[in-house]
Amino acid sequence: MNGADDILLTVEALRVWFPVKGALALLGRAPVAHVQAVDDVSLCARKGEIVGIVGESGCGKSTLARAIVRLEQPTNGRILVDGRDIARMSGDELRRMRPMVQMIFQDPYASLNPRMSVFDAIAEPLRVQRRLKGARLAASVYELMDKVGLARRFVRKYPHEFSGGQRQRIAIARALALQPRLLVADEPVSALDVSVQAQIINLLAALQQDMGMAMLFISHDLGVVRHIAHRICVMYLGRIVETGPAEQVFDKPAHPYTKTLLEAIPIADPEQERNRIRPIPKGEPPSPINPPSGCRFHPRCPQAHPDCSENDPRLVPYDANHDVACPYA
């Protein structure tokens, strides 16, 4: 899985900025500022690979996910899926590409239509894209329910009759209906009970391996990502600051922000947890409307040097297949 032919998704210099409209906008003038949700992000995902994207809330993970599936319009950059730039697509061309890239959302209740039964929710993409109906449609819906571990007797029930974990299984079945080549999972277990999270993670891993698709697994919880991802991208304030194989990022973190995230993972041993010393980043995360000059992490970094406020670091090789955006790593 090392050749260029294995790469399914390539994101190049992606930027997603949202205008902040002030009083001048009412007069037809340009926005006074922009929220730099995603700024110059590049990454790739190979066929059959799970790429974890991690970072604290507000770092741009969900905006990146929505841009990749074209629920947000990129401001700049390219999104290549199987060599075709979907960032430039619209209309029928984009509609034909939709089956290749599907998404699982964070809240399994908000992402399901409360007026649609399980059957209708799973059947809708099959009706629209595959033109299935009758016995063929029903057989496909039952097959998808079997795949995600939903009993067929639930087929006429509605979302409010299910637990959070069951709702997420419905959402997963709907996302898999068109046999996508890339699945984007945006915090798929953060709204679920801890007891259910492991079941959904194991289900996603098994389905990904069985179907051979690529997956972007987005989470703020490194402990969750560690169990499923082959490779990890760490985001901070709209930028990727470290990327590499999961084992290397966890066992040999290079960027100070990555180290801080890893220190925040609880330890199961109460005695060890009680005696831990965690480095607490200074201050609050900066605003994406007015990010700091130089390295975006430098106002909170415990290892900051004087030139960190001036030089804007880019990802450079740190180890084998392991890149970091910090000259003092």
Image: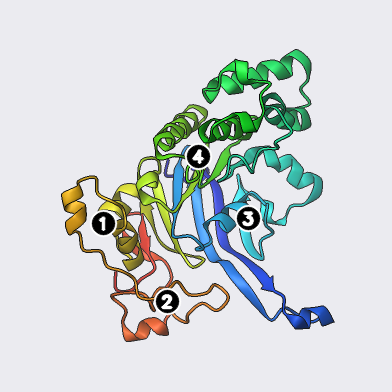
Q: Position of residue 270 (x, y in %)?
A: 20, 48
Classify residue 303 by image quadrant.
Answer: bottom left
Which label's residue is closer to the chain start, 1 or 4?
Answer: 4
Which label's residue is closer to the chain start, 4 or 3?
Answer: 4
Q: Label 3 to label 2, Cα distance in Å? A: 24 Å
Disc 4 is placed on an element classified as loop
Which label's residue is closer to the chain start, 1 or 2?
Answer: 1
Q: Label 1 to label 2, Cα distance in Å? A: 21 Å
Q: Position of residue 140 (x, y in %)?
A: 66, 20
Q: Mark 4 — residue?
A: 47
Q: Nearer the viewer, residue 185 or 43?
A: 185
Q: Label 4 to label 2, Cα distance in Å? A: 33 Å
Q: Residue furthest right?
A: 27
Classify residue 280 by image quadrant.
Answer: bottom left
The disc at residue 67 is 3
Disc 1 is placed on an element classified as loop
Disc 3 is placed on an element classified as helix
Label 1: how many Cα within 10 Å (few below 14, some 14–19, many 20+): few
Q: Residue furthest front?
A: 161
Label 4: how many Cα within 10 Å (few below 14, some 14–19, many 20+): some
Q: Mark 2 — residue?
A: 295
Which label's residue is closer to the chain start, 4 or 2?
Answer: 4
Side of 131 relative to 234 (left or right): right
